[in-house]
Amino acid sequence: MGTNEQPRGAETRDGRAPGTWALVVMAVVLVGGVLTYLGPVLKPFLLAVLLYYVTKGAADALVRWRCPAWLAYLGLFVTAVAVTISVAVLVSSQALAFRDQWPRYQQRLHHLIEGRAPGVEQALDQFIEVSAGDVFKFVFATGAGIVELLVMTFFYLLFLILGARSLAGWVQRASPESRGPASWLSAAR
């Protein structure tokens, strides 16, 4: 054995075998790859699960105040849509105002650079025009991505709400505690 080789079963300073670290690194890479490819599906699903538990608490509170469950969920849905539309209108109005003011900002930038760096003005003008187009394309693409996320989240949330009662029944029937200890013991044999 050379001086740098460790005997089989040797551990590092922290008490773990080198194979353990390799396994951890491989698991992290694997999880990262899965999340990269499944991200477009997992993001709206996880958001829908979060929203389900948030709305479930609010809906249960409304049901305790003698509101029918369907009306509680419908009211929460209408409230969420109203808030989302309000935020979207605010953001779009600000984006349109920025777009309308962009030539003025462009002129200010041009006047700031003018005379300080000769020969750079033309390159700056081209850069600003290209950058403005790229910025608006990016904002549009981001907006479209957000709309897609919201639509997918809505459908996941809808199916979670509609299937919540049957899912709870399935889980209860599948758990050994719901069948009693005698049936659990006989099923284990």
Image: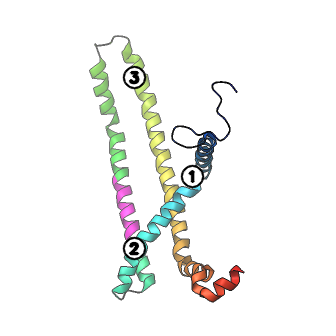
Q: Position of residue 53 (x, y in %)?
A: 44, 70
Region of the chain picked out in magenta, as a range: 79-90
Q: Quadrant of residue 5?
A: top right
Residue 77 lies, in percent from the top left, at 42, 72
Of callouts 2 and 1, the N-terminal one? 1
- For the C terminus, the quadrant is bottom right
Residue 14: image x %, image y %?
51, 41
Tell me the crowding category of disc 2: few under 14, some 14 to 19, or many 20 or more residues within 10 angstroms, Cα based. Answer: some
Using the rendered image of the protein, determine whether residue 24 is visible from the camera's viewpoint.
yes
Q: Does residue 85 show up magenta in the picture?
A: yes
Q: Secondary structure at mark 2?
A: helix
- Vertically, is 112 above or below 12? above
Q: Are marks 2 and 1 in contact (CB under 8 Å)?
A: no
Q: Can you say whether 13 is above or below 31 in the image?
A: above
Mark 3 vs mark 2, foreground winner is 2
The residue located at (38%, 84%) in the rendering is: 63
Q: Residue at x 66, y 83 (%)?
A: 185
The disc, 3 or 2, on the residue closer to the chain's N-terminal end is: 2
Is residue 2 shown left or right of residue 103?
right
Amino acid on which the number 1 mark rests in the picture: Gly
Residue 32 horizontal side relative to residue 68, left or right: right
Residue under numbered circle 1:
39
Residue position marked by numbered label 3 in the rendering? 125
16 relative to 149, above or below: above
Which is more foreground, mark 2 or mark 1?
Answer: 1
Verify whether residue 166 appears in magenta.
no
Q: Which residue is mark 2?
A: 76
Query: From this viewpoint, which residue is outermost toward the right?
Result: 189
- Image coordinates for residue 126, horizontal then vertical, percent: 43, 23
